[in-house]
Image (spheres, helix red, strand yellow):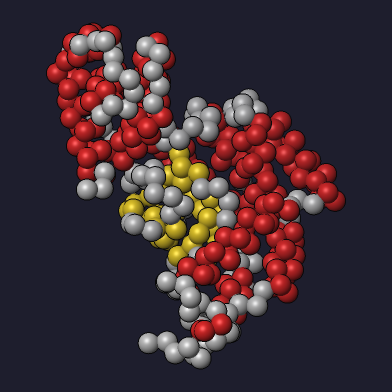
Amino acid sequence: MIGRNDPCPCGSGKKYKKCCQSKETVTVETVQMEELEGILQTFYDVYPERKDIPDYLELANEWKRSLDTYLPEEEMIEAIVLDEFFFHHRPDIWTGYLDRQKKKLLRPSVLRVIETWRQPQAIIGEVIDVEEGYIAVKSIFNDELIRLRRESEKPVPVGVHLFCFMLPDGTGEEGQFLAVSSLIFFPTDHADVFREFAEQFEAYEEQDVSKFLKEYAMNFWRLLGQNGYQGGEFTEFEAGVLLDAMDFLEKHDRMSRKLLDVVEDFLVEQQPNARKETAIAAGAIRFGQEHSFFEPLSMTLKEIAEWFDVSPSSMNKYYKELDAYYLAKVPV
């Protein structure tokens, strides 16, 4: 039991009655995360400053010249390069920002976390387990295991690879991190790239993961581009299912973002093993109609199956799988 005059458990240094007593719940982790997330967001809102933009543009243009054949979206290249610029090429910008933040902060517990943030690390790894609040990730280079804080409740399948720059998450638990940059997941049809990049590291004389990722970062993205990666989060098969479903809805003057969200999560989390994309798409349309996700169609179930050139039994199989998946997710 915390007394009114005891130090507040959030770490502010104030008495409990002057700080968090009025809040229904308070944990050190919750309060810290709010401040830490604010610190990260402010950094990206403010930097790079005008004086640093020429250096950033020089690096960005170098990457564009090398990668625009493979990664057609300039905005994507610029976003990747921005983190490379901050954390690999001009770390003084990041550390200078932290030093300025420390002068503004009063909460000792947050200051202690900031001291562990001076050297963000890049991670390229495979998801080996998914927990409620964390993703267990194994590095492709040395099998190091870490736990990465989940950024949303969107499903994350075991077996996919990811990339981000990361920082200790502030809990004090060893091996637990949060993503300082965008957490990028790669579809499973690019698995060969990660094996090849890991093999390149094995031939790297210094055997230092951080140095390797700084020196060969552009090569990693070039390999992905050569393998057909264009920034999407879905495999070609998954994208095909979604495009088939959207094409049907568009041609029948229907649209349902809710249906597409459910289908996206189903594809990623369940990884259905279908022979034809259209079978799942047909099942999705029946599922959407049964749950009134769009205006009713003046089509029989047989006609829907025929439109997708699949059998009614195939359509019904994936309708049932989607229905079971959705009902298991819906709160009772």
Residue 31 visible from this viewpoint: yes
Residue 147, image quadrant: bottom left
Residue at the image position 28 percent from the left and 14 percent from the top: 297
Image label count:
0
Residue at the image position 39 percent from the left and 26 percent from the top: 256
Residue at the image position 42 percent from the left and 61 percent from the top: 146
> Percent from the top left, x then y, of residue 221?
57, 38
The single residue placed furthest to the front in the displayed view is: 22
> Percent from the top left, x then y, of residue 285?
29, 21
Relative to 86, does residue 184 appear above or below in the rendering?
above
- The answer to whether residue 145 is left or right of residue 228 is left
- The answer to whether residue 321 is left or right of residue 277 is left
Q: Quadrant of the N terminus?
A: bottom left
The single residue placed furthest to the left in the displayed view is: 313
Relative to 248, does residue 11 appear above or below in the rendering?
below
Q: Nearer the viewer, residue 192 or 280?
A: 280
Residue 268 visible from this viewpoint: no
- The answer to whether residue 67 is left or right of residue 317 is right
Q: Nearer the viewer, residue 47 or 222?
A: 47
> Percent from the top left, x then y, of residue 44?
67, 52
Q: Nearer the viewer, residue 74 or 215?
A: 74
Residue 195, image quadrant: top left
Relative to 291, does residue 53 appear above or below in the rendering?
below
Residue at the image position 63 percent from the left and 55 percent from the top: 41
Residue 97, image quadrant: bottom right
> Percent from the top left, x then y, of residue 48?
75, 50
